[in-house]
Image (tube, rainbow, N blue to C red):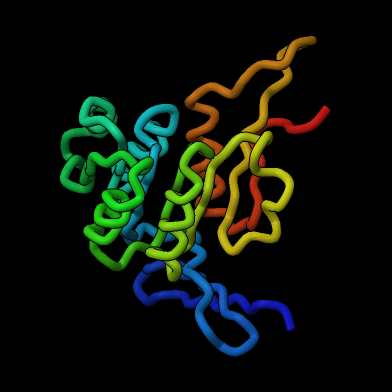
Amino acid sequence: MPNLVLAVRLADGGGLWVWSIDSGGSLIHFLGMDGSDTPINVLCIGTTGMLAGMTSELVSSGHRVYAIARTAQSLERCALGIPEEHRDGYVGCRCDYSDPESWARELDEIPDPIDQVVCWIHGSAPHAFDQVLERFSGSDILRVGPSSTCVADAASQNYRTVILGALRDGTSIRWLTHEEISAGVMDAIWSRERVSVVGLIGD
């Protein structure tokens, strides 16, 4: 029996909240909201560089964002892109996810509940994403990555995937800009698609 989708519309314009439920009635994960201004808690990992625009938009839309990055400078640069009146919704956390023990401690310090996780984690630290899956098993987890590493088994995973491709510009192919990546990932957050593609992949 396929998984079920439970949608609950909240009163007073609260929007539509959507969860994925397995055939036994157990909650798999929170899938997101559709057309709601109700704030959610979002954990953003590795999103203060090329995904800083997405991080800023989430905070500016009233959501509470916990951003984890390796350097304080990266966190500060991301904060400067957030309108001052919304910066209370941004919590920057500095941690290097290449060290499994310190990474586990950092994840444990993120307060529950976390509704949405957005990850850009390099393949050089495969344990880091596994730890995220374990710690936030009840959250909607969205992994962002290049087509070279994400295509093969994306649809079969217990998390959602955003595959970054390229764009055709006349007769040539170019990489996506940071703005295009941020916009594509924002669309993927609310789309509830298991696999989203930003740009073109393949030949």
Q: What residue do we see at 67% from left, 52% from top?
A: 154
Looking at the rendered image, the quarter that the C terminus falls into is top right
Q: What residue do we see at 74% from left, 84% from top?
A: 1
| Residue 78 visible at all | yes
Classify 187 as above or below 135: above
Q: Foreground residue, 193 or 157? A: 157
Q: Could you tell me residue 177's position as x and y percent?
A: 53, 22
Would you say 123 lies left or right of 139 here?
Answer: right
Would you say 152 lies left or right of 119 here?
Answer: right
Q: Could you tell me residue 120's position as x and y percent?
A: 47, 40
Classify 85 as above or below 159: above
Classify 167 as above or below 24: above
Residue located farthest toward the right when viewing the structure as drawn: 203
* Total labels drawn: 0
Would you say 114 lies left or right of 5 here?
Answer: left
Q: What residue do we see at 72% from left, 31% from top?
A: 200
Q: What residue do we see at 44% from left, 28% from top?
A: 50
Q: Foreground residue, 167 or 35? A: 167
Q: Could you tell me residue 160's position as x and y percent?
A: 58, 55
Q: Foreground residue, 137 or 19? A: 137
Q: Could you tell me residue 30's position as x and y percent?
A: 47, 68
